[in-house]
Image (spheres, grey):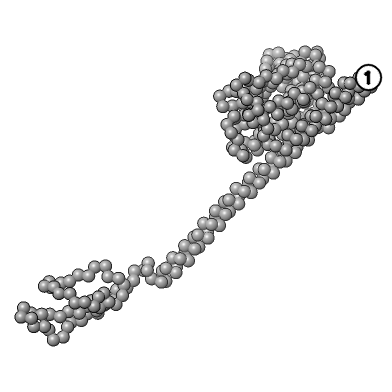
Amino acid sequence: MKGLNDKWTETDQRTVEFGSLEPGNYTFIVLAIDKNGNQSRKPARFSFSISSPFWKRVGFQIVAINSGIILLVIGVKGRIKKVAKKVHEKQLVNRQLAEFKLEAVRAQMNPHFIFNCLNAIQHFNVNHDFDSAQQYLKDFAFLIRKTLYLSKRDFISLEEELEFLEAYLKLEKLRFEDQFLTTIEVDSKLNAAEVLVPSLLLQPFLENAINHGLKFLKNKNGELKVSFLRVNDSLEVIITDNGIGIKNSKELKDRKSLNHLSQGINLASGRIEVINKIYKSSISFSTEALDASNTDFPGTKIMIFIPLKPILT
């Protein structure tokens, strides 16, 4: 078989088979020999060609390669577009978080609070209580420095948060001349140095309880209690006060054409939403009246839930 091999093959069969011949040109040559050994004078020849299958043809391969390149380019472009979209979304969320953080700092150390603190310092000076004025000014400076420092971080330890809250409540009690008592309780099952909480998240809730509940008490029997509890795999923060309550506060603000929900709570809610998106967390909070039947001092309860599982930064 020329094109396959140049050697003769003897057989006593009347047929021969060649399987799986590669594409190419072939010439089949046959010589007949009888039983006496006489050979035919001229061999018979049969020439034929086997064409390449379409997938081995150059034209098809070129088309296939081009198609593969096109599909690869489309796939890469699609992937790049998808990644770029995710990056863009993350940048938007990060930008939104940064804006919320900036607004939160401005809201927490708002002009009214600073003005009232300075007035309190001036009051001590006018009454020649210079020791109290100096102590108040010292605490006020500490709170401002602490706020600016902690506001640069997304999460801080519960220990740092407690230190900040205690400093804030100390100033507020001085400002309102001990109109209310404060209590902070921490569950013994919590390691305050290891538990992480969003920075400066709780202060707006305390500010709201003071300025929209305890502030309007006619007596000086106000109470503000903050409890930190471990419930399964969550940190549960419970803030209770015996102020005028949600309904009375809303009616008071409606008469003054003000929004019921404070700006600080709005900012805290927005920060929680963005933090949950970025860190795939499930922080939440709820507000309820403690005793709706008590129209004079029903009080308010705020519950904040923060997962204790590691934050994905």
Is residue 298 rendered to the left or right of residue 312? right
Q: Position of residue 86 (x, y in %)?
A: 60, 48
Q: Nearer the viewer, residue 27 or 272?
A: 27
| Residue hosting label 1 | 127
Q: Which of 83 and 8 is in front in this view?
A: 8
Q: Quick one: quadrant of the N terminus?
A: bottom left
Q: Position of residue 99 (x, y in %)?
A: 72, 41
Q: Quick one: quadrant of the C terminus?
A: top right
Picture residue at 17% right of the left edge, 79% below the top: 30
Looking at the picture, which amino acid does disc 1 mark? Answer: Asn
Q: Quadrant of residue 291?
A: top right
Q: Is mark 1 on a helix, strand or loop?
A: loop
Q: Quadrant of residue 225?
A: top right
Q: Can I make out residue 253 in this image?
A: yes
Q: In which quarter of the image is residue 227?
A: top right
Picture residue at 57% right of the left edge, 51% below the top: 82
Relative height, residue 36 to residue 158 (above, below): below
Q: Position of residue 216 (x, y in %)?
A: 80, 19
Is residue 66 rendered to the left or right of residue 94? left
Picture residue at 67% right of the left edge, 34% below the top: 155
Picture residue at 87% right of the left edge, 21% below the top: 132
Q: Position of residue 117 (x, y in %)?
A: 85, 26
